[in-house]
Image (cartoon, rainbow, N blue to C red):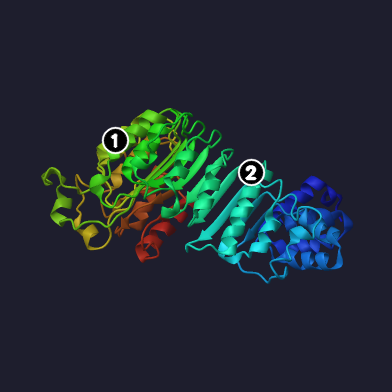
Amino acid sequence: MHPVLLIDEILRHIFLFCSYQDRASLVFAAQTCKAWKDPALDFLWYRLASIEPLLPILHGALSLGEAHNFQSYAHRVRHIAHRLEVKDYLGSPAYSPSTHLAQVALPNLSTVYLSLPRCPAPMMSLYMSPQLQHIEADLGFKFSKSSNEVAFCDFMEQVFVDCLELKGVNLRGLSSLRLNNIISSMGKLQNLSLRLGQSLLPSTLRAIMSFPHLSELEVHAGHVDVDDLEGNYMEVQFPSLCKLRIRAKSKLVKNILHRIQRDNLRYLHIELDDLSPSTALWSSILSLVCDQAASSLLYLQIEHHFEAPDIPTSSLLDMANVPQGSTISTMSFDDIHILRVIKNLRHFACDVTLPPLFRDKDMADLATWWPDLEHLELGSAPQGDEAESRVTGSAQITIASLASFATQSPKLEKLILPLRIGDHPLRPPASHPLVANKLRSLTIAQLTSCKPLELAEYLRRLFPLLEEFEGPCDDTRIWTDTKASLVKHRIS
């Protein structure tokens, strides 16, 4: 054996790779020699996709009184999941491991994922650890006071008392009143995700606002009204929040944004839950985003999906003749223009059912706003008959818009545009000399060009590092020929 394979640091790098790519090789490595046994076993047991490998060992340990055999493996486990039903080696509910083991079953466990409908109540005590830092649980979507639900609430109450290292909780499904109250008391959390639907109580959301260390929050609150949050707040609200993912109606989103401390927010994902576009007040929402986070925001994603009304094709062709007060889009480019003051933005995505109708001039302006932008996503154009009806003109961007990003967005790596590329004349950009840019991925809405060689050459000149060119139906002949030409240009 080469001496370098006995250097612990190198060996652990190799085994770390194997733990993700070829776990079976760790079994053989542990059997190869004494020097490899412990580090190989460490990585083999470090992350378990199921509790099942431990249960036969635990069953034997409880039966024979040889807990040390179980603990020699259990102390290596840091991350574990309980997603699937497993054979019940523990027997009856009274035959709980906590009554037979002299110490915590998994003393170094850091993160756990539980699927409550598939996790028998007596097994939950296995996951109690003083080192526990993160809990993720699928609660299921049926209201029931089952033994599992009661056991999970007992588990969470014990976690609150005993797990001083706990930093994050992620819950999905339907929550009971008792669990809502437990969440409200966990004021030391640093990150919290609550996808609880209508089972999330407004009182729980009010309590979360005062958590002093909460830096990351994801919450689905489409059923919560602004009036539900009214009350006297003695503490500063959201004092540490820097990452927010929220799905709610527009009025509640604005209310929450008002409560966040100014220039703390670095990451913001808004998904409006309004049933129609008429109540989606994007202008006031985005103005508030700028007021609260113009100096700090790095990531912004906005979404709004709803059942789109029937819109006459003629209205899409000529926005100038749309009657005042009618709603063709949930937002306009003027709304997005508000965001130009967020100078440090690195990621912007806009995904709405009725997106703005951009023009080349709009893209030229936008490309100058955010010099550090790395990811830009402006949705996709309508497909099918509606897409065919929308002519190239003032209401739609053309391939000429790409030159703006090539010359003005030096750090942009991924670009997704509602762009249709046909057989337009491909003239080299003249207004600005090309500068080095980092774009590696371009996604468009439609490709109808029958000149793949010419198009590939044009794209390569604009974006020398381009590796991915994607869109709907990108396995058709037009797409494959264009991609092949891009590869050819890259090699040459």
The residue nearer to you, when weighing 112 against 439, is: 112
Q: Residues within 10 Å of mark 1 (few under 14, many from 20)?
A: some
Q: Measuring 61% from the left and 50% from the top, which residue is drawn there? A: 156
Residue 370 visible in image: no
- Residue 35 image offset from top left, x and y in percent: 87, 54
**Is 362 left, or right, of 411 in this rendering?**
left
User: In this rendering, is residue 156 above or below 27?
Assistant: above
Which structural element holds mark 1?
Answer: helix
Identify the residue at image location x=44%, y=31%.
233
Q: From what the image shows, is residue 287 above or below residue 18?
A: above
- Asked whether 136 or 366 is in front, the reply is 136
Q: Amino acid at mark 2?
A: Leu
Q: Is residue 380 above or below residue 359?
A: below
Give percent across and percent down for residue 221: 40, 48
Q: Nearer the viewer, mark 1 or mark 2?
A: 2
Q: Nearer the viewer, residue 348 or 361?
A: 348
In the picture, the disc for residue 166 is 2
State left or right for residue 375 relative to residue 137. Answer: left
- Residue 47 image point, x, y percent: 69, 56
Q: Is residue 41 left or right of residue 1?
A: left
Locate residue 179 relative to residue 407 in the image: left or right: right
Disc tally is 2
In the image, residue 30 lies at what x, y percent? Answer: 82, 60
| Cβ atoms at labels 1 and 2 below 8 Å apart | no
Task: Check residue 284 in the rendering and tell me which mark sits there, or answer none.
Answer: 1
Q: Quadrant of the N terminus?
A: bottom right
Secondary element type, mark 2: loop
Residue 291 seen in the current view: yes
Q: Is residue 226 above or below residue 342?
A: below
Q: Amino acid at mark 1?
A: Ser
